[in-house]
Each structure stands twice: as structure tokens, then as C-alpha cells.
Amino acid sequence: MPAVTELELEDLETELFLEGMFRRYGFDFRQYAPASLKRRIRACMRQEEIETVSALQDQVLHDAAAKNRFLLAVTVNTTEMFRDPAFYRAFRDKVVPLLRERPRTRIWQAGCSTGEEVYSVAILLHEEGLYDRCLIYATDLNEAVLERAREGIFPLSAMRRYSENYFDAAGQGSLAEYYTASYGNAIFHEPLRRNVVFAPHNLVTDGSFNEFDAILCRNVLIYFNQALQARVLNLFLDSLPPGGVLGLGAKESMCASPYEADLETLDGAAKLYRKVR
Amino acid sequence: MGYEIVVIGASRGGMRALATLLSVLPRELGGTVVAVLHRGEGLGDELIRFLQSASVLPVREAEDKDDLRRGVVYVAPPGYHLLLEKGGLALSTEGPVSWARPSIDVLFESAADAWGERVIGVVLTGTNADGAQGLARIKRRGGLTVVQAPSEAECPGMPEAAIAASAVDHVLPLAEIPALLSRLCPDLNTVKP
């Protein structure tokens, strides 16, 4: 029997588990960036008080509730309203004028998690007088977070930070105008989601489903390996007309992508690109 | 095979300590330096400019999926964890670990997993215990571990925590760490880029 280190064994178990997860449930994590994925699987094992990846696999494959807990643990749902305010300022300055030229606008927020950034974009478009002719498709692979996004209820304790972000993002009023405070929660007003469609979509396994004037996918691609990043960028390009806008996360780079030539930079620091052909 | 990756963690007092360390690393350093410094989210480009002004090596803020180039210093961007893969760098916005993002433990543990005995881990000044578990993992996976001597660190807490968590290979004054690193890493002129 060949000698195998604990780490090699864990890598083998992880490979088998991800294969099983895909074949049993259709969720494909096989091309996620391995280092942070491994951390999240380990964190899930601690939470479930399970010693090995094989034992986690046993539980997840046989128990749908355990599968749902795993999905929440293995995806990253860090988000906040007006996260990276400079991005929203650049969006106002450089993307809004392009959207104004169109009679109707479709925007896709891919990997929207619990929706904080969807409400942020809705508020921005409302303030620019564009919201009524916009349709926002907000997607995530995880039904549990989409359900929370649909509710639009966020902890009141976060509003101070979000208000600062909103102010830094050149918000034109006060964030408090958009929600009602109730029992420690901020309940965002219904009109903000009137033109939002929350729907499940998996960037890894699902295809293009529409054409969009702008696609925002921020801090999602960092969890994918380079091959998968290229595939998803291709999916975005397939979903953009010439002139369509793509917005990525602040530290995400197009440099290694085979599609660099298909996109021109609208704002380098904000990672806003425009499809040229 | 030799050492190829130097991971450095620093917290309070770390900006000055890191600049001092980088200022004496030679241009011929054949390893890749990856550093996590705890700092406020506001401090972005200024930190990189400050560190660059101290060093002859190129200093860059890490972007997702950056290649690892020898002789380059990569610094974690504020608000992101920085991880090492076998083929390059990766970022994550997962929640803070021990109140820190970037977390030194996250960098060190990923370095140990992906690069094993080719890693040198260095813990510098700071007041918390970040880096201690990660350094222990580097040691367990056959890497080399170095800690700034607590007696001369601006804040001794982090070096002390690292020393308490595992049998550290070298406890050295800051001024002696660069010479050790340049001796242990290959000379850039003798290795493939």
C-alpha cells in the first residue's frame, strides 16, 4: 500500500465528495479555487462535528437538510449595501449615462447572495430616475439566500455602516428613507423590489438566459479556478450585446482572461468593462 | 528542492517592521514573498507605496489569481483574505478569522497545504495571536519557521503566541531575519524565472 499523507488523503476524499455532490444534486464545486474551498469544507466539518470529508459526504448524500447546510457553509455570503462605495460612484458616472440612452434596461446581478447589493443598485437607479424602466435579474445558486433577498430585511445594526457606504457612494438623500425600522430590523420598501426578479441560477452549470445591458458579478469569480473563471466570463459575454457593461469585484482581474480583447475598460479601479464586439 | 515561498505576518507595529525587513532583502532573492499586514480598510495604495520606497524588490498589492513571480513581494489587499494555491494567489471575502481579514493564519495554512516544505513562515510584531496556528501548520508540513524576538518587537504579543504554539526554528532580532531569508532562498540568477 503506498504511503499517503493526511493531506493527500483529504484531497482525495474532497475530490470524491465534490464528484458525489455533483452527481447526486447537480451542484458543481469541482472547479472552485481549492485553497479557500478546503477551508470552508473544514469549517463545515467542525460545525457538523464530523472528523473526515468522507463522513461529511455520507451525511450530505443521504440527508437533504445536511445538503442545504453544506450549501450555505460552502458558499460565501459576505455582502453589504454599497460595498466598495467607489464602485457605485463609478457606476453612477460612467454606466448610468449609457443606460439612459436605452428605452428599457435589463441588469443581471449574478451571485447576489442575500440581496444587499441588489437593493443598493435599485436605490441608485431610483435616484437617477431610471428604476421604472429597469428590470433587475438577481440570481444565486442558493435558494436559502434568495429567499432572504426577496424579503429585503436586514439587521438594523448594520445600517450605520451601510449609511456611511451610501453617503460615500454619492447617495442623494438618506438611506433611512428606503426602509422602515422594526424590532431590530430594517425592512426595505416594496417598490425597490417591484422590478427585481430573484431566481436560482448556477454560473457553473446553467447557461445564458437573456441579454443584458449590464451584468454585475462582484467577488464571485474569486472563488473559481482560472478555467472556470474563463468559462463564466464567456457566459457573460454571450449575455451582453456590443456596448453592454460588465462589473467585477475590486481585486478581480481580467488580465489572465482569454477574453480581454473583447472588453474595453470603462473604469479600471472600479473594474467596469464594456463589450466592444 | 529548497525554499521558494516566504510568508510574512505582521500586526501592530508591522508596517515599520515589514519595511525594515524588505529594505535589506537583496534584488537577487529567488523566493516569492507574500505578506499579510493587519491594517484599516482605508489604507490602500499608500501602504504599497511606502513599502516600495523601502525595497529594491517590486512590491504589489495582490490581485486574484496573480502568478507567483520570484523576487516579487505581494501584499494582501485590505478587506480580503489572501491564500496561496499551488499555482498562484487567490483572494476570499469570507468572514474575518479571529477578527482579522486579511488573516495571517489563513495565508499561512494555505501556504503550508499547497507548498509544504518549500515554505518559510515569518511572524513579526503584533498584539494578538494571529499567525500562531498557521506557523504551527507550516512547521508540521515540513516548512521552516521564524519569529521576531519578542524582546525587541514593538509589540511582543504575536511573536510570543507563535513561540508558545509550536517549536519555532529561529527566534531572531528583526535585523537578522533578511540575511537568513536570502541565505535560504535560491539566488535569482541560478534559478529559472
Image: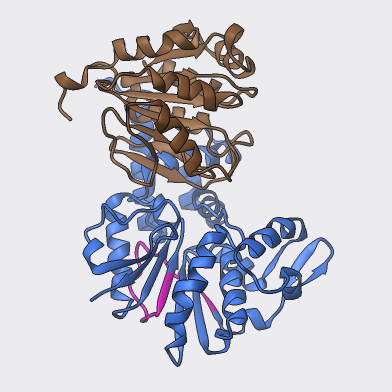
Residue B161 seen = yes
Q: Is residue A241 magenta?
A: no
Instruction: Using the image as rendered, state which of residue B169 and residue A139 is in the foreground.
Output: B169
Q: How many marks?
A: 0
In the image, taking residue A6 as reference, residue B101 lies left or right, namely right
Estimate the x, y position of residue A167 in percent, counting from the top left.
66, 64
Chain B, colour shown: brown
In the displayed structure, would residue A186 be above or below residue A101? Answer: above
In the image, taking residue A30 as reference, residue B130 lies left or right, namely right
**How is colour applied across the structure in the image?**
by chain
Estimate the x, y position of residue B155 in percent, counting from the top left.
63, 18
Instruction: Using the image as rendered, state which of residue A174 and residue A142 is in the foreground.
Output: A174
In the displayed structure, would residue A206 be above or below residue B29? Answer: below
Please give the name of the residue rendered at 50% of the width and 62% of the height, measured from the top-left corner. Answer: A87
Estimate the x, y position of residue A14 in percent, counting from the top left.
38, 40
Q: Main secondary structure of the magenta part?
A: loop
Please give the name of the residue rendered at 66% of the width and 83% of the height, measured from the top-left corner. Answer: A191
In the image, taking residue A76 as reference, residue B40 lies left or right, namely right
The blue chain is A
Image quarter of residue A79: bottom right
Estimate the x, y position of residue A62 in percent, counting from the top left.
49, 52
Image quarter of residue B182: top left
Instruction: Using the image as rendered, state which of residue A239 and residue A12 is in the foreground.
Output: A239
Residue A55 seen = no
Which quarter of the image is occupied by the N terminus of chain B? top left
Which quarter of the image is occupied by the C terminus of chain B? top left
Image quarter of residue A82: bottom right
Magenta residues (range): A197-215
Determine the residue located farthest toward the front in the rendered image: B53
